[in-house]
């Protein structure tokens, strides 16, 4: 059985690179989690998980992470990624992520709508939301990345 994460943080970054993968890697570095092995997870923040402004995670660690990202090689295109967490009283949280063409504000608005729908579907009362986003205007090849990283 895998342990349940006890901490979380929200990060985001945007960057250019010579290839889409390099742009993605550079956006990870800009977000502060570029030296971790991300394990993509879905939408639930464990009950009692505590927010940390920054997590001290050893390089190379397998890190559960909910994230959205977009790469583009269309010069001038505006791309964005966002994550958000919805909280209820004394229970788990719900994480949503979005990526696409547009602004950070549009990305956060889309995530907010998804969080509201997720709480409605679960019959839970939404008490609080938090968001993190990145926006980037592509020069040659760019990436926008946003994530909720979980840790123990």
Image: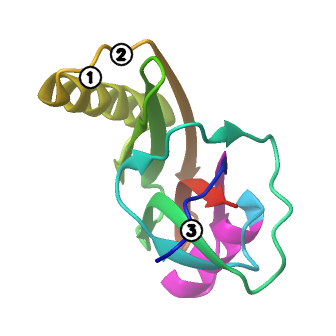
Q: Please say if 22 is above or below 106.
A: below
Q: Position of residue 66 (x, y in %)?
A: 46, 58
Query: How many numbered discs sit on the rendered protein?
Result: 3
For label 1, the crowd category at 10 Å Cα-Cα, with few meaning under 14, some 14 to 19 and many 20 or more, is some
Q: CA distance from mark 3 to mark 2?
A: 26 Å
The stretch in magenta equals 8-29
Disc on res. 126: 2
Residue 20 in the magenta stretch? The answer is yes
Q: Say which residue label 1 marks.
A: 116
Nearer the observer: mark 1 or 3; the answer is: 3
Q: Is residue 16 magenta?
A: yes
**Picture coordinates of residue 104, whole percent (x, y):** 49, 36
Q: Which residue is at the front of the view, 47 or 52?
A: 47
In the shown orientation, is residue 22 left or right of residue 127? Answer: right
How packed mark 2 is, by other alpha carbons closer than 10 Å (few <14, some 14-19, many 20 or more), is some
Q: Residue at x 82, y 49 (%)?
A: 54
Residues at circles 1 and 2 in contact by the CB criterion of under 8 Å? yes
- Furthest residue toward left: 121
Left-right relation of 40 to 144:
left
Among numbered discs 1 and 3, the one appearing first in the sequence: 3
Vertical comparison of 139 with 60: above or below = above
Residue 23 placement, left or right of 90: right
Counting from the top left corner in percent of width and height, residue 143 is at 53, 65
Q: Secondary structure at mark 2?
A: loop
Q: In the rendered image, which quarter is residue 27 located in?
A: bottom right
Q: Which residue is mark 3?
A: 3
Location of the C terminus (image quadrant): bottom right
């Amino acid at each position: 059985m895998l342990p349940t994460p006890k901490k979380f943080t929200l990060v985001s970054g945007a960057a250019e690179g010579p290839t889409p993968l390099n742009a993605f890697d550079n956006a990870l570095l800009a977000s502060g989690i570029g030296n971790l092995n991300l394990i993509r997870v879905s939408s639930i923040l464990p009950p009692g998980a505590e927010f940390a402004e920054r997590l001290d995670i050893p390089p190379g660690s397998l890190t559960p992470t909910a994230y959205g990202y977009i790469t583009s090689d269309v010069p001038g295109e505006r791309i964005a990624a966002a994550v958000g967490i919805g909280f209820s009283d004394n229970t788990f949280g719900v994480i949503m992520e979005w990526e696409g063409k547009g602004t950070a504000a549009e990305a956060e608005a889309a995530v907010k709508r998804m969080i509201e729908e997720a709480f409605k579907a679960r019959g839970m009362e939404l008490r609080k939301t938090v968001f993190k986003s990145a926006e980037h205007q592509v020069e040659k090849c760019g990436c926008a990345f946003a994530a909720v990283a979980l840790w123990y």
